[in-house]
């Protein structure tokens, strides 16, 4: 390998058999291949997330049919999408500390959200009766 100084920057670029190499020693072809593999992986994860959402919807439909008939026509789509979105958001976090923080934030939000809903329901029931 020989060093070549780029005119765009003062940092030297390494050249291997006439091909530029980045700081980690990877050629553009290797970087492109890694990007393609990452895109394939992300597509598979999206498919898995969607499959999980659809599986939960099917489970609710089979095990709790009254819940499906008692809800709006968009319930199944909404349920599937919230599951998909949560799976996709969860995989964006890769640091252990960030994962633990996200889990804590999600738990706190769920508690707050459910408590708000219960308070609203109590007010409607108390106010109507």
Image (cartoon, rainbow, N blue to C red):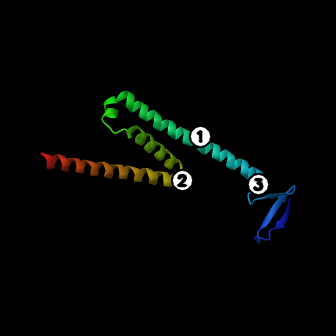
- The residue beneath circle 2 is 95
- The secondary element bearing badge 3 is classed as helix
Position of 30 relative to 44 (above/below): below
- The residue beneath circle 3 is 28
Measuring from the top left, give residue 129's x and y in whole percent: 12, 45
Looking at this view, is 11 or 38 the one in front?
38
- The secondary element bearing badge 2 is classed as loop
Looking at this view, is 69 or 104 the one in front?
69
Looking at this view, is 25 or 36 the one in front?
36
Neighbourhood count class around disc 1 (C-alpha, 10 Å): few under 14, some 14–19, many 20 upward: few
User: Sequence-wise, which precedes: disc 3 or disc 1?
Assistant: 3
Q: Is the N terminus in the top left, top right, bottom left or bottom right quadrant?
A: bottom right
> Going 80% across and 71% down the picture, which residue do you hit?
7
Looking at this view, is 61 or 24 the one in front?
61
Q: CA distance from mark 2 to mark 1?
A: 21 Å
Measuring from the top left, give residue 102's x and y in whole percent: 45, 52
Position of 78 relative to 66 (above/below): below
Measuring from the top left, give residue 120's x and y in whole percent: 23, 50
Left or right relative to 21: residue 79: left
């Amino acid at each position: 390998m020989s060093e070549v100084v780029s005119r765009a920057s003062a940092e030297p670029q390494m050249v291997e058999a006439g091909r530029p190499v980045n700081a980690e020693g990877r050629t553009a072809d290797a970087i492109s291949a890694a990007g393609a593999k990452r895109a394939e992986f992300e597509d598979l994860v999206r498919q898995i997330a969607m499959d999980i959402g659809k599986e939960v919807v099917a489970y609710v439909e089979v095990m709790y049919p009254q819940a499906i008939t008692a809800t709006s026509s968009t319930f199944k789509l909404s349920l599937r999408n919230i599951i998909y979105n949560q799976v996709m958001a969860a995989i964006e976090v890769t640091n252990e500390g960030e994962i633990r923080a996200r889990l804590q934030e999600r738990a706190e939000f769920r508690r707050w959200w459910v408590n708000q809903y219960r308070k609203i329901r109590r007010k409607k029931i108390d106010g109507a009766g």
